[in-house]
Image (tube, grey):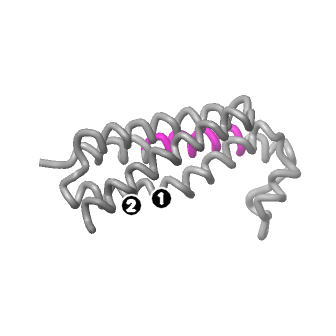
Amino acid sequence: MHSEILRPMVALIAWTLVMLVWMLVTRLPAMKAAGADLGTLVGSKAADADRALPAQVQWKAHNYNHLMEQPTLFYAVCAVLALSGTGDGVNAWIAWAYVALRVLHSLVQATVNKVGPRFMLFLASSLALVALTLHAAMAVF
């Protein structure tokens, strides 16, 4: 038998891969249109892409990077909950809430990129992560 909390973990990984594809299908044509040649490009930085590419294209890349940041804590705390036998029930529901909030955050950032709604979604997902962390601490200490 496996822990329910593994499902939202896999769902967020899958969503991250969706964002990767979305980033690539928008960014690669934009790079070509901007005259960037991947065969000769050397040592570029994110700031270079921000200057050279349209903002709407870069929003997807920024969000993909965000999915490599705080969600790493989500994966770790979910693993602790699964291994401690407390990844079912309320913790699984909180994990699903975290995933839903991160997906909404991605959609806002990748489309309209309004900072107010993005921040509220980030804050709400952070609170879900805090709850999961507290529950993990209670399980292992």
Q: Is residue 85 above or below residue 88?
A: below
Which of 16 and 83 lies nearest the eye of the viewer?
83
Q: Main secondary structure of the magenta part?
A: helix
Find residue 128 and report its horizontal and vertical position in percent: 45, 44
Residue at 29% x, 46% y is 5
Find residue 85 and report its horizontal and vertical position in percent: 18, 55
Determine the secondary structure under disc 1. helix
Q: How many marks?
A: 2
Residue at 22% x, 52% y is 86
**Category of crowding for the residue at label 1, using alpha-carbon neighbours closer than 10 angstroms: few (below 14), some (14–19), many (at least 20):** few
Which of 2 and 15 lies nearest the eye of the viewer?
2
Find residue 95 and report its horizontal and vertical position in percent: 37, 43
Which of 29 and 90 lies nearest the eye of the viewer?
90
> Which residue is tagged 2?
76
- Which range of residues does the magenta coloring cover? 14-28
Circles 1 and 2, Cβ within 8 Å, touching? The answer is: yes
Amino acid type indicated by mark 1: Thr
Q: Is residue 23 magenta?
A: yes
Label ID, residue 64: none
Amino acid type indicated by mark 2: Ala
Residue at 25% x, 55% y is 82
Q: Is residue 124 above or below residue 52?
A: above
> Which residue is tagged 1?
72
Find residue 98 and report its horizontal and vertical position in percent: 45, 41
**Category of crowding for the residue at label 2, using alpha-carbon neighbours closer than 10 angstroms: few (below 14), some (14–19), many (at least 20):** few
